[in-house]
Image (cartoon, rainbow, N blue to C red):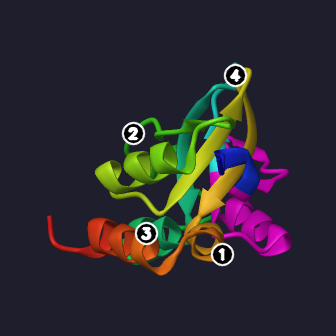
Amino acid sequence: MTTARDIMKPGVQWISKDTTIEQAARTMAELNVGSLIISDENERMCGIVTDRDIVVKCIAQGKAPSNCRVDELCESTPRWVDANADITEVLDEMESNRVKRMPVIEDKRLVGMISEADLARHLDDNQLGEFVTAVYGRP
């Protein structure tokens, strides 16, 4: 049985909800990632900010990245999966919520992130096709 732990990228880092967009972009560049998990003051996951969020919700809106905080771009608390979740549970969660990245939690702690690239490396062609259709197809 393939689990979330088997396909996730470990070592994901939190950023504070008070972090500026400018600093978040620098952190993404340093870590070579396209998203960061946002935590509140109690280290609870309260959002995800993506490189696309930065472009569409900040830059394109004429906001200054040095004055805009990451929590201003978050829409809702992100979905997540347990580290021991079967790959079918991971796919169901990502497909039903039409998300391209999924935080992985173990014992209430963030332990990794699953991205489209991780799925592409671990799914067969049929599973990958179903994922792409579910996430990118018209609702």
Q: What amino acid does circle 2 point to?
A: Ser
Assess disc 3: are there few (<14), some (14-19) or many (≥20) residues with their C-alpha within 10 Å of its C-alpha: some
Q: What amino acid does circle 1 point to?
A: Arg
Residue placed most toward the observer, 1 or 110: 1
Residue 131 placed where, x, y %? 38, 67
The label on residue 33 is none
The label on residue 108 is 4
Residue placed most toward the observer, 75 or 133: 133
SS category of the residue bearing label 4: loop
Query: Is residue 43 one of those drawn in magenta?
Result: no
**Mark 3 or mark 2: whose residue is earlier in sequence:** 2
Name the residue that disc number 2 marks: 76
Mark 4–mark 2 distance (CA, rounded to whole Å): 18 Å
The answer to whether residue 139 of the structure is visible from this angle is yes
Q: Residue at x 60, y 33 (%)?
A: 45
Q: What amino acid does circle 4 point to?
A: Lys
